[in-house]
């Protein structure tokens, strides 16, 4: 069972191009990604905008927070590639979102 779990994890990491490391910054110009990609040991690098927002839903007493994460659709293969479980792929000229199943 342990071998199956390890194999499943490794397959998921490979299929989703899962990152080996993460850095969170408050702000950085996108042009600096190229400079960072030149550092020794960096094979591939992605930048994303991440923002947490509170949503007010009338009649709903609990706080609802959304974590918005940008995705660069022009890249063929992205680091931490999201996996579509149902619905339609992102793209086209319309604004669209995916919602995590959790």
Image: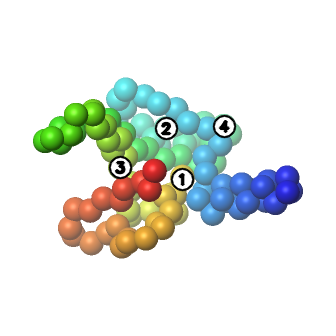
Q: Earlier in the sequence, mark 1 or mark 4?
A: 4
Q: How is the image coloured?
A: rainbow
Label 3 sits on residue: 70
Is tag 3's residue or tag 1's residue first in the polypeptide sequence? Answer: 3
Q: Residue at x 38, y 64 (%)?
A: 74
> Is label 2 in contact with label 4 (beta carbons under 8 Å)?
no
Q: Where residue 101 sits: x, y (%)?
A: 44, 56
Q: Nearer the viewer, mark 2 or mark 1?
A: 1
First of labels 3, 2 by sequence position: 2
Spatial CA span between label 3 and label 1: 12 Å
As helix, strand or loop, the secondary structure at mark 3 comes to loop
Callouts 3 and 2 close, C-beta under 8 Å = no
According to the picture, the residue beneath numbered tag 2 turns out to be 35
Residue 79 marker:
1
Determine which residue is flagged by label 4: 40
Marks 2/1: CA–CA distance: 18 Å
Q: CA distance from mark 2 to mark 4?
A: 11 Å
């Amino acid at each position: 069972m342990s071998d199956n779990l390890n194999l499943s994890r490794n397959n998921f990491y490979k299929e989703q191009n899962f990152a080996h490391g993460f850095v969170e910054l408050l702000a950085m110009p996108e042009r600096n990604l190229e400079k960072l990609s030149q550092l020794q040991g960096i094979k591939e690098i992605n930048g994303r905008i991440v923002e947490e927002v509170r949503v007010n839903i009338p009649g709903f007493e609990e706080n609802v927070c959304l974590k918005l994460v940008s995705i660069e659709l022009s890249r063929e293969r992205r680091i931490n590639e999201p996996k579509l479980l149902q619905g339609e792929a992102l793209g086209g000229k319309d604004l669209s979102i995916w919602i995590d199943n959790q």
